[in-house]
Image (cartoon, rainbow, N blue to C red):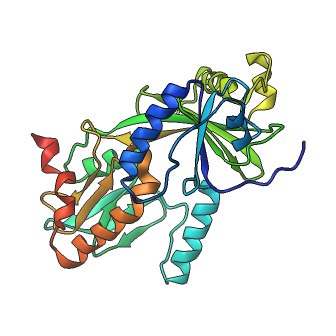
């Protein structure tokens, strides 16, 4: 395989110029001047100049230079190093199995290793949050929107992250390979991998990346590291970021759906303010626990 250099930015690719213009108009409105988006789309053969991995079926595309994706492994490693440098102790391989409470306060976390005393607890465990919240007497109607991804070797490989508008799939150069991701599967709160979903994502990508496989049966030998994970969704689509009723020092931060990494820093900043001052910042009002009990 030829070696390709990845470049910053995300190419939004479409089978239809009309769909591309519609998507760009929405993105420009959402950006609201906070980051640059192109004035217009690129159409026809010139669209393929944005990234040579694009299929000839792509008829329109545009590049947003400030967009990209996160390499989850590299992110977790860097986050761990930053926490260690700040003096934070991370207890690895210690699953939290429950919480010890005394007089309306959480005093310790029960883990598979031992108990960890605490002055406050934040439950930010994604799809594992409902079980921990139930231990404190709160039911959380969290549902998993399962997404799939896998790695493949492509030639040519994408130089940018590619978002395929009509197919709702993404191809990203990560770790020296191409990671393809997509779909939204509401099949319960579990991590069961349905190979049919993997095939569906691969088929969707072939419209935009070209015929990188001939028959679905070939995918067993071509695909590496298939993965499935549940994005945590609440019924109204908003996350829960609040102190838990009846507990002075227990908080929840979950339900961010597909935007956990994106919204994580802002959530942490405002929740830390809530914990340290005892006052909920006004900006967190829409994400309170009360709305889930109406």
User: Which quarter of the rendering shows the N terminus?
Assistant: top right
Q: How many marks?
A: 0
Relative placement, left or right, of 187 versus 226 is left
Q: Determine the image quadrant of residue 195.
A: top right
Q: Nearer the viewer, residue 263 or 144?
A: 263
Q: Nearer the viewer, residue 67 or 278?
A: 67
Instruction: Please indicate, yes or no, whether residue 83 appears anywhere in the rendered image.
Output: yes
Q: Residue at 55% of width from left, 76% of height from top?
A: 82
Relative placement, left or right, of 81 versus 89 is right
Q: Residue furthest front?
A: 39
Q: Nearer the viewer, residue 118 or 232?
A: 232
Q: Residue at 69% of width from left, 23% of height from top?
A: 57
User: Which quarter of the rendering shows the C terminus?
Assistant: top left
Q: Residue furthest left?
A: 294
Place of residue 250 in the rendered image (x, y in percent of width and height, measured from the top left): 24, 64
112 vs 219: above or below: below
Place of residue 229 in the rendered image (x, y in percent of width and height, measured from the top left): 52, 40
Q: Nearer the viewer, residue 49 or 258?
A: 49
Place of residue 29 in the rendered image (x, y in percent of width and height, measured from the top left): 36, 46
Place of residue 62 in the rendered image (x, y in percent of width and height, measured from the top left): 58, 42
102 vs 45: above or below: below
Q: Residue at 73% of width from left, 26% of height from top?
A: 56
Relative placement, left or right, of 268 versus 90 is left
Q: Residue at 33% of width from left, 62% of height from top?
A: 267
Q: Determine the image quadrant of residue 277.
A: bottom left
Instruction: Please indicate, yes or no, whether residue 243 appears anywhere in the rendered image.
Output: no
116 vs 73: above or below: below
């Amino acid at each position: 395989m030829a070696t390709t250099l990845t470049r910053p930015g995300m190419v939004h690719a479409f089978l239809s110029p009309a769909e591309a213009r519609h998507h760009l108009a929405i993105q420009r409105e959402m950006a609201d001047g906070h980051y640059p988006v192109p004035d217009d789309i690129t159409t026809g053969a010139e669209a393929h100049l944005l990234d040579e991995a694009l299929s000839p079926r792509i008829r329109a595309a545009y590049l947003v230079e400030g967009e990209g994706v996160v390499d989850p492994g590299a992110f977790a490693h860097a986050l761990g190093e930053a926490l260690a440098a700040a003096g934070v102790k991370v207890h690895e391989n210690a699953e939290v199995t429950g919480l010890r409470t005394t007089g309306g306060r959480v005093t310790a976390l029960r883990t598979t290793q031992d108990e960890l005393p605490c002055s406050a607890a934040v439950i930010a465990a994604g799809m594992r949050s409902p079980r921990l919240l139930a231990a404190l007497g709160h039911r959380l109607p969290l549902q998993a929107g399962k997404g799939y991804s896998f790695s493949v070797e492509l030639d040519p490989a994408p130089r940018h992250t590619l978002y395929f508008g009509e197919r709702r799939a993404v191809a990203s150069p990560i770790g020296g390979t191409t990671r393809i991701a997509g779909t939204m599967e509401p099949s319960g709160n579990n991590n069961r991998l349905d190979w049919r979903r993997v095939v569906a994502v691969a088929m969707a990508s072939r419209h935009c990346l070209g015929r990188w496989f001939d028959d679905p049966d070939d995918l067993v030998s071509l695909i590496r590291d298939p993965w499935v994970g549940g994005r945590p969704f609440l019924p109204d689509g908003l996350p829960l970021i609040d102190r838990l009723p009846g507990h002075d020092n227990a908080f929840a931060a979950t339900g961010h759906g597909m935007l956990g990494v994106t919204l994580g820093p802002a959530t942490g900043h405002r929740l830390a303010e809530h914990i340290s001052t005892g006052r909920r910042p006004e900006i967190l009002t829409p994400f309170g626990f009360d709305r889930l009990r109406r």
